[in-house]
Amino acid sequence: MEKATFAAGCFWGVEAEFRAVPGVVATRVGYIGGTTENPTYREVCSHTTGHAEAVEVEFDPAVVSYERLLEVFWDCHDPTTLNRQGPDVGTQYRSAIFCHTPEQERAARASKERLEESGRLRRTIVTQIVPATTFWCAEEYHQRYHEKQGGGCGF
C-alpha cells in the first residue's frame, strides 16, 4: 500500500470523492502543513496554526495509480482559487498536494503542467506542491462525515 495526501477545501467532500475510487483502501481526514502539534478543528479554523484541511489516502498501486488520484484531485475542486473553495474561505481551505516521495512530487508537477497547458482552466493554478509533513488526524466526528451525515461543503 502507498499513501497520498491532498488538500482541496472542505475535507468532508474531498474524502467522499477519494473513497469512491476503486483501489483506495482507506482514507482519513485531518490537518497538515502547519506549525501546531495535534491541532483541533477549532484551532485550525482560528487561522493561527497554518494547517490545511486534508485527506490522507491509502491506496493499492496495483489497482489505482497515483496519477489517477491526481486526476480525482484536480477534478474535485477549483485549483485556481487561493485559500478558498466555494463558500469556505481561509488558509485551511487551500489547494495543496503533500508529496510523500520524490516520485509523487515529479508526478504532481507534471500533472499540474499538463492541466495548465490544456487550456481547461481560465485562471492560473495556485495549488501548492510541497513535501508531506506530519498528518494530524481530525476528530472522529469528521471522519467519513458524508457517510454519517450526508451533504455538506457545497462543492
Image (spheres, rainbow, N blue to C red):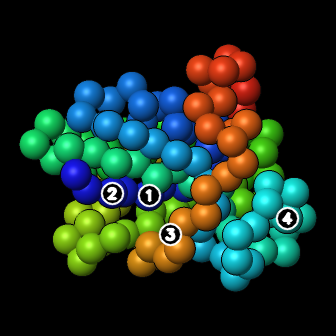
Q: Pick whichever of labels 1 and 3 is earlier in the sequence.
A: 1
- Can you tell which of label 1 and label 3 is closer to the viewer? 1
Q: Which of marks 3 and 4 precedes in the sequence?
A: 4
Residue 101 in the figure: left or right of residue 11:
left
Extreme left residue here?
62
Which residue type carries mark 3?
Gln
Name the residue located 71 percent from the left edge and 19 percent from the top edge.
Answer: 149
Identity, as a three-letter code, of the amino acid under mark 4: Glu
Tag 2 and tag 1, C-beta contact below 8 Å: yes
Disc 1 target residue: 5
Q: Position of residue 69 (x, y in %)?
A: 31, 45
Quarter of the image for residue 2 reads: bottom left
* Picture residue at 22% right of the left edge, 52% below the top: 1
Say what amino acid the circle numbered 2 marks. Lys
Residue corresponding to mark 3: 128
Query: Which residue in the protein does label 4 denote?
Result: 43
User: Gap in Å between the C-alphas at discs 1 and 3?
Assistant: 12 Å
Which residue corresponds to mark 2? 3
- Mark 4 vs 1, N-terminal side: 1
Q: Residues within 10 Å of mark 2 (few under 14, many from 20)?
A: some
Residue 57: horizontal and vertical position, in percent?
40, 48
Q: Do the residues labelled 4 and 3 touch (CB within 8 Å)?
A: no
Above/below status of 83 relative to 142: below
Can residue 127 be seen here? Answer: no
Image-quadrant location for residue 86: top right
* Disc 4 + disc 2, Cβ < 8 Å: no
Tell whether 124 sits left or right of 3.
Answer: right
